[in-house]
Amino acid sequence: MRTGHRPAWRRRPQSRAARIAVPLAIPMALGLTLGAVLAFTGGPSSTTIKQSAAGATATPSASASPTVSAVASPTATATTPAAAAANVSCDIIVPANPLTAQGLATPYQLTGPNGMTPAASGCTMANAANLGAFVQATILNPATGALSVYEPLVITQGTTAAVAPVVPTLPAGAVVTINFGFNGTNLTQVGATANTLRQAGCVNGLNGSIFGQVSFCNGTNFFRAAFQAERQGKLTIPALGTSPKDGMTCPSTRSFQLIDQDQSDNVTSIYLLNGNGQTAQNNAANAAALAGATKLANGSDNILLAAFVDPTLGCTPFEAPDLSQAGTPGTSQALDELSAAKNQAAPIALVPENDPMTLVNNAFSATKTNLYRSNVGQSPISNANNQADSPANYCQNMVNVQTPFLSNNQGVLGTDTSPVPAVGSNLFTFMANRLSMSFTNLNCQNFGLTNPVTVVLSGQGVATGATFNLTPQKATAATTAAGTGAAGTGTPPNQRRGRPGHQIQNGSGM
């Protein structure tokens, strides 16, 4: 629920909504760099962790989608620290039967691409700030409409869990969706068996063109079942509530007040990391057993909403019992999408074709965009929703809605800490800089629009202030590509690609 009690992160300092500073890939255009540090308040203290040098285990079956990197992947024989530092892509091994209780409790394994070991590639959970992978499940009881969440554990291939994951009890006929998040550039699913990914409905993108940081298992089926449960009156989604700070409806992940260039991406999972490079689920028992462990988080729009924007505005995110935390209320990406689908008033932000994760060969792809949308419970592209979410209209709404929101709330947002201190000195300057970056990375200038944000940067490249042009703007041009192009509907997604511009986007999802 969003109203009636204190924000979740203040109520539960051990939860995934604890205040965090999360890692982002900073736009090169701003000349920013960011160290591999995650900072938390409350819970286990931060410690310096040495990278695990554990060897690889037996190679699982090939992924349904090839690894596509924005930069050339090192060869399998590369073992130097420089090669590992240059790598931005990893594989994640999905356990057999991932939608079952036993599958959820079986650790996922993070490893290097193209046969590289974790150590050679840097694909270790000890290196989570740069290349950490995170998994999150949301569970629906179709008979009652009850929702719950669970955080499957990710370990470095060749290691074991610091504490064995909790085996959840699932309702009969449970419908499970699994969301993946990544702090690097490209995360590719690899099945533990030849049929794992197909049987679980796992989607990494199109053949030859993966989404990048995110992927899904059974997302389309989950949202279909959840929406049916709503229509039947079994599932009730709470209202967003009203912010006592500005008197406005609390934002959702589909609000143009909050979105960036790649909305609806990454997860709110948090793990614990011990001094041996082993991970564990983040719950009270494990926190007590692993005193001094470091918390690991996935930078996401969902954490930005649940742990920063909502608490600052006096709002509360949609929560459900977390089966990996003994039923303590927790958030999830899928819960955020359900809340937004139910409550967000027009204009509604849906993943646009100029989202870097849905481009194919730097061109718009309706097919890939619709595949992404279906796995986060969003409607496919249509003339109706293109009034808000065509590439041009998405940019226009982002400029015309988010700019006055930030301007009107800069006093409130400026009182809170920054999710990424290297991007902004507080929550307000972080979000202002994020909006400016998103304008650039969505190529909004191609639609006759002007960046509405002027950011004041410190000598270290940190945003310390921002001013806005509040004049409403109207998009006047249309393109089919992230760079330039003529009017049209897009290019068929039939070629391999990297993620154009991903190295200069503002996020591990945020």
Image: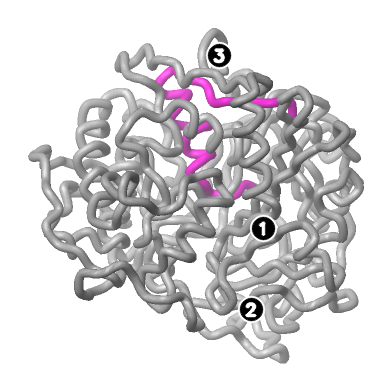
Q: Mark 3 points at which residue?
A: 6
Q: Which of marks 3 and 2 is in front?
A: 2
Residue 45 or residue 302, whichever sits in front = 302
Tag 2: amino acid: Pro
When the figure is inspected, residue 341 is found, relative to residue 380, above or below; the finding is: above
Q: Residue 212, located in which quarter of the rendered image?
A: bottom right
Is residue 71 in view? yes
Q: Which of marks 1 and 2 is in front?
A: 2
Q: Circle 3 — which element?
A: loop
Q: Mark 1 points at which residue?
A: 133
Tag 1: amino acid: Ala
- The answer to whether residue 402 is left or right of residue 17 is left
Residue 464 or residue 130, whichever sits in front = 130
Q: Residues within 10 Å of mark 2 (few under 14, many from 20)?
A: many
Q: Mark 2 points at which residue?
A: 66
Tag 3: amino acid: Arg
Residue 266 or residue 233, whichever sits in front = 233
Is residue 243 magenta-colored? no
Task: Find residue 369 and report its horizontal and vertical position in percent.
Answer: 45, 60
- Residue at image location 81% in from the left, 37% down from the top: 174
Is residue 311 magenta-colored? yes
When the figure is inspected, residue 384 is found, relative to residue 154, above or below; the finding is: above
Task: Find residue 287 and report its horizontal and vertical position in percent.
Answer: 80, 35
- Please report the bounds of the magenta region as a residue range: 297-322
